[in-house]
Image (cartoon, rainbow, N blue to C red):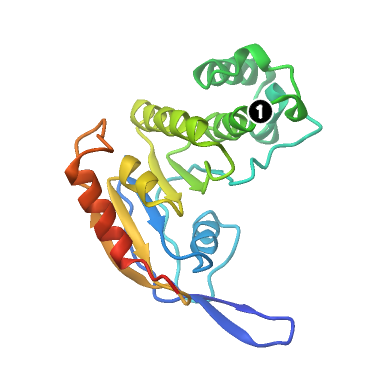
Amino acid sequence: MSHEFTSETGDNFSVLSHISFELQKNEFISVIGPSGCGKSTLIKIIAGLIKPKTGFIDIKAPKTSMVFQHFAIFPWLNVFDNVDYGLKMANQLKAERIKTVKHILKEVGLFDVQDKYPRELSGGMMQRVGIARALVVNPELLLMDEPFSSLDNFTSEKLRQEVLYFWQKYNLSFLMVTHLIEEAVEVSDKVIILSSRPAGIKRIMDIPLKRPRNKRSQEFFKISDEIASLIDRK
């Protein structure tokens, strides 16, 4: 799969070049690469938000959800209604929706703030709303575009552990874009390293570390250093 954009002057510039990989059921893959290489474009193509110029995306998971970098929740809706939105648009019965939403809100720790609005929430809570809204539709594939980059380190670490819990509990497949090597090594089964734009795949690296992962271990540092050596620093 390849993709290009057209500039305001009418010139075409390539963003992604011959990207090809497989994501297996219940696999967690992270995509990492230099800033501006096209990571977010790639995940938006997989989500169906952008149509690739050439090639195709073959998604066998009928239900796909996405968690965005900047929360992407509706400021005029409270927590409950934000999480309920997708189910409501799918015309599910109200009684079923209420039961499902309340269950997910308990899972992500938002049950006690379900009547609050985004302006009343911390960044971590707002991203929990985004995660809850993605989970509530019972997806098989969950896409995440740098979901923790707007959060402080403590909140990011806590949410990463919660995401791993949901991944294992609900038997999901995950594809996450990140710019943090440590984050990718901590959560992933495989890490896809992209080159500079137009981004191609430099390497797909298996992460053979047992979970939970010790970020202070020599093995963790060795893999992180190897990934760092493959990322273009232009």
| Residue 58 in the image: above or below residue 56 | above
Q: Residue at x 24, y 32 (%)?
A: 211
Residue occupied by mark 1: 122
Q: Where is residue 69 shown, x and y percent of the image?
A: 59, 46
Identify the residue at the far right of this view: 76
Q: Residue at x 73, y 87 (%)?
A: 9
Identify the residue at the far top of this view: 112
Q: Where is residue 111 shown, x and y percent of the image?
A: 61, 14
Side (left or right) of 52 relative to 19: right
Q: How many marks can you see?
A: 1
Q: Where is residue 59 shown, x and y percent of the image?
A: 42, 54
Quarter of the image containing the N terminus?
bottom left
Quadrant location of residue 51? bottom right
Residue 27 in view in this figure: no
Quarter of the image containing the C terminus?
bottom left
Side (left or right) of 22 relative to 207: right
Quadrant location of residue 80? top right
Quadrant location of residue 57? bottom left
- The kind of residue tagged 1 is Ser
Residue 51 in view in this figure: yes
Side (left or right) of 88 relative to 111: right
